[in-house]
Image (tube, coloured by chain):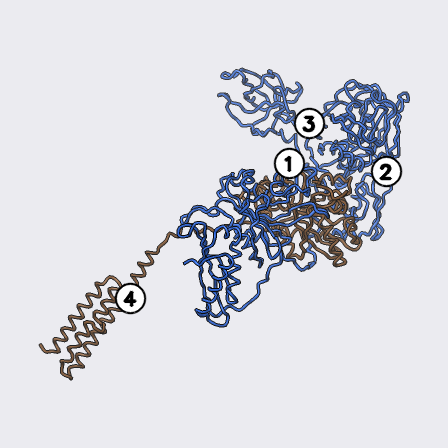
Amino acid sequence: MSEIDALKAQLESLQSEALSAFSAVADLAGLQQLRVQYLGKKGALTEVLKGVGKLAPEQRPVIGQFVNQTKSVLSQALDAAEAELSIHAKVARIEAERIDVSLPGRASAKGALHPVQRGLDEITAIFSQMGFAVAEGPEIENEFNNFDALNIPPEHPARAMHDTFFVNPIGDEPMLLRTHTSPVQIRAMKRFLAEEGEPPLAVVAPGRVYRCDYDVTHSPMFHQVEVFKVDRDVSMAHLKGVLKHFLSTYFEKDVSIRLRPHYFPFTEPSAEVDIGCVFCAGKGCRICKNSGWIEVLGSGMIHPNVLKSVGIDSEEFSGFAFGLGVERLVMLKQGIPDLRMFFENDVRFLRRMGS
Amino acid sequence: MKIPFSWLKEQVALTSTPAQIAGNLVRLGHEVEGIEQPRAAVKGVVVGRISSKQPHPDADKLSLLKVDIGQAELLDIVCGASNMDTGDKIPVATIGTSLPNGLTIKKGKIRGEASCGMCCSETELGLSDESAGLLILPADAPVGLEIGDYLALEEAVFDLSITPNRGDCMNTRGIARDLAADARLPLLEVAPPVMEVDANVPLTKVAVTASTDCPAYLARRIEGVKLADSPAWMQTGLMLAGMRPINGIVDVLNYVMLYLGQPMHAFDADKIKGEIQVRAAEGGEQFKALDGRELKLNAGDLVVADQSGVIALAGIMGSADSGVSDGTVNIVLESAFFRPARVSETRRTYAMVSEASMRFERGVDPEMVLTGMQQASKIIAELFGGVVGEITVCGNVSEINAGKQMHCSVTRIEKRLGLALPEAVDDVLRDMGFGIIRLGDRLEVAIPPFRHDVSIPEDMSEEYARVIGFDAIPEILPALTTTAPAQPDRSIHDAVAGGFLQAVTYAFISEKEQRLFVSDDGNDIGLQNPISDAMSVMRRTPWAGLLNVAKHNLNRQQPGVAIAEQGRLYSKTAAGHDENNVLAWMMVGETEADQWYGNARVANFFDLKGAVEAWLAVRGLTARFIADDHIQGLQAGQSAKILVGRVEAGRLGKVDGDIAAAFDIDIPVFVADINLDVLPEGKKAKFAPLAEFPGVERDLVFLLEKSAFVRESNTDAIVQTVSKAGGKLLTDSRLFDLYEGKGVPEGKVSVGVRFTLQDPKRTLTQEDSDAASAAIIAAMDKRFGAVLRG
């Protein structure tokens, strides 16, 4: 056998030996070893090349071409094996890192606003968006702001109906826990007139109120929102328009409203406001006592005596006002059956109503 | 107030159904709380005749009846009553009938025997609260007739809630007037009947000295009355109207009051000594009321009195001894007009309510003072005999509320309502008693004396509105009145974002709870009429309420509770009453439950401190927590005041164990509060360029005396020392490790401090950080005697 044939045979056997080694290797590290073993500086192929020096110069290019070819075959085979092993390695890693995605997430403390707060926020926001300014007032009031200025003189039967809590007087002046948010009307109008001179003014006044009444359907402390607007030519039609917009926005549906004549000392005319039952769509159910209507608030055109008490000319200006019970609206919207739950502060209730 | 439909129909020929009438009443401003329908309630119950009666083969107490209800076949009925015999007429509830007690009659077998109906008692028909067996009807009752028709049961009873302004409608007459006008039907004329009087009956002597409070007083003597129960029709009517029969005379007076609205009183004439005086009470005067209460009257209360003392609190209640009783023969009838405000004030003073006072304080119809007297006298004479005397009249009823006029422009009312006023509506109002004249845009109104509530144009706007109907008013959104919206208060919202549930507790707590956290300095604001001791003082601490929330929830197996509340605290000040806005937190029990990734963790001081710090950080504020052993209710050594700048803005700490125990809590509870009224404005976020050169982070670990660390040095002082010593390049420093135990000598504590140096203009060198470290080590040694740990 000629030198060249011997080399060729050597290369061929090297190639087949290498290829079978490549296909047997199990991991990337082993493959890297084989790459060094066959194609490295001191590798098997280099060894074979050492024999090239013995060849005649004209034979060298022939065998050189043969060597390059072998090198290229091995190199490609290595790359292919590496690619395949990489995929295997990745798959293995992914499999090793597999988790149970149904395990609960790490808990972080979840707070919740009280449902009454959410009601207050929602109601106040609706009126803010309609341009009503937010006002607040003290909860401990005098009789003038809570009653007299609102056209409820001392001997008035309505005054007794308010079940007023009295607290320590200031000097000789009796003080009470406000029985409604209406005194904010008086305070806000006075302040406004002092600052601006004359109407228009539009105010929304949320707050806590107190009545000396405690049973299944009464809480001695609850929340009201007082809404009023005074301007030239404010009419009952405007009252109805604002009520319709507010109640439809709050209940997130187009609710129908019904006004019934009623009596409040601070409004004339006065009206109780019903909405079409949000539970049965007016068909009649237990909540609306089969009437199809649910009473939600009291309203009316501000009595001239109230405007007079703060110095607004009732010949020139008129206004509407209404006061709504926040707990009542929240109960209707959220389907809460019992007023007392609001003040028990059971965390299960707070969590459930807060989501 | 309840009004039977038949009473209204006597006054006006109404043809509508009860439901339609109710709708009209609501539209006119009279709230209908309910409609009882006694006749409809027993529909399906008919008159039956027992044609045979056999004992039940398997039950001693049951009978087998064959009952004729006028149909082809007799009904088999098993009956448990024993008071009936063959031939008796009885009410029979037929199959499918629903009785007032909720029972629905079905075909069935009782102890093996078929039963096709039920024989009824009065109770089962809703006619009486108790009964002894079946209702046995008169022998001439027509078989097969509906029992409701046979007994002439009332078709409907309206339960009305009359508003306080409409005293004129607290009777059948007033409601009938509104309904008649609304339906354009005539209202029955009611004129005082002409009475024959006997001049031999002596005039009752009356002296009215309090004529302002009592502008009219009528009295009349009736002699020789034979007192008996009122007739059944009257008793039935009174009960339908919600009143209890008392005795013949009182029943007549109540009946007339329910019809005409004029409350009256009857005295036993033989118990009155001397003349009747209507006068102001003397202070301290005694009065024993009909309801048994003994009152000491205030000067100024209006009373009816004789020589021996007060015989009635005018318009409210008679005395226990002067009224009509079994032996009464001669009576004095009183019919008067008492000033509403007077009655109201006295009634409230003694917390008394009567049917009379409810009407007087709303104002009665002056015209009915005489009419009522005459009507009542007439009925009494007819029912109980007696000789009727002349009326003693004091004052002039025709002057009361007389001649009230009002005028305004039609346009003004139209503008107020957003509604046109058709002239046809004037006729309705005329039928309601108003004298109305329109002259172009000018509206002139004569107001009837019984409308105490109407005096100004706005009052008339309501009259027009209710007659036309509020439904006719359009819904129009007014033009916007814009105001710059204020920044909404986010205090509670940010606390909730920190993982707390918001609670709302009562603003009043018990004095005992108040004393746990606030000492008795006389500045509590107390309720003068509290509902209970538990709600008797306005709170000066937010913590009592929160501890009660903790108690409620821990008692319900909640492993941990984190609550925040925003509200006011109330206290007396030199100037008056102060209301102070606070935000408060409470944490107790587990903050984290046992989990697959870790064990349960129980809340401690630093959980709550972190929450407060985070809340402050949202507002651009930082606080220093200064140990304070003297915060009432908190445990010394685990309590701090919260300083924001120089302002003492709040407190934080562990609730004293004994106090927690008072709320049945036996695990550590932590509370905090922030006074929102004193909290300074925080820093507004402002842009600054981000550092481009890397910073250097270094850790230094020191050994300190433990006692010095806890009591004086504390972390704030260490961080302060490090910051100061670290020089201008120091951008951050904090405590990152705190350790005692193995490897640390007894009585010492190992404190790790991490600081960051950074220069905006260059990369720092080893020399920079070495210099800073050296300065810090020196400062720590100087201030705390701290030694760098090897």
- Residue B216 in sight from this viewpoint: yes
Mark 4 Cα-neighbour bin, 10 Å: few <14, some 14–19, many ≥20? few
Residue B454 horizontal/vertical position (percent): 80, 43
Q: In which quarter of the image is the N terminus of chain A?
A: bottom left
Q: What residue type is labelled 4?
A: Ala
Is residue B223 shown left or right of residue B521? right
Tell if the residue under mark 1 belongs to the same chain as the one under mark 4.
Answer: no
Residue holding disc 2: B400
Give chain B's shade.
Answer: blue
* Residue holding disc 3: B152
Taking the image as shown, residue A179 lies to the left or right of residue B621, namely: right
Q: Name the residue under label 4.
A: A83
Counting residues from the start of the chain, the first of labels 3 and 1 encountered is 3
What is the distance, in whole Å, between disc 2 and disc 1 at their CAs? 47 Å
Query: Which one is in front, B329 or B580?
Result: B580
Secondary structure category for the residue under label 3: loop
Q: Which of marks 3 and 2 is nearer the N terminus?
A: 3
**Residue B141, quarter of the rendered image:** top right
Q: Where is residue A332 in the image (x, y as percent from the top left)?
A: 59, 45
Q: Mark 3 lies on which chain?
A: B
Q: Which dot, 4 or 3, sits closer to the camera?
A: 4
Q: Residue flagged by tag 1: what amino acid is it?
A: Asp
Seen at 71% across and 43% down, the residue is: A176
Chain shown brown: that is A
Report in which chain the residue with disc 4 lies.
A
- Asked if residue B248 is positioned above or below residue A338 in the image, the reply reads above
Residue B268: x and y in percent read: 81, 22
Determine the CA span between mark 3 and mark 2.
Answer: 41 Å
Q: Where does the image place residue B361, in percent across and percent down from the top left? A: 78, 36
Q: Label 1: which residue?
A: B533
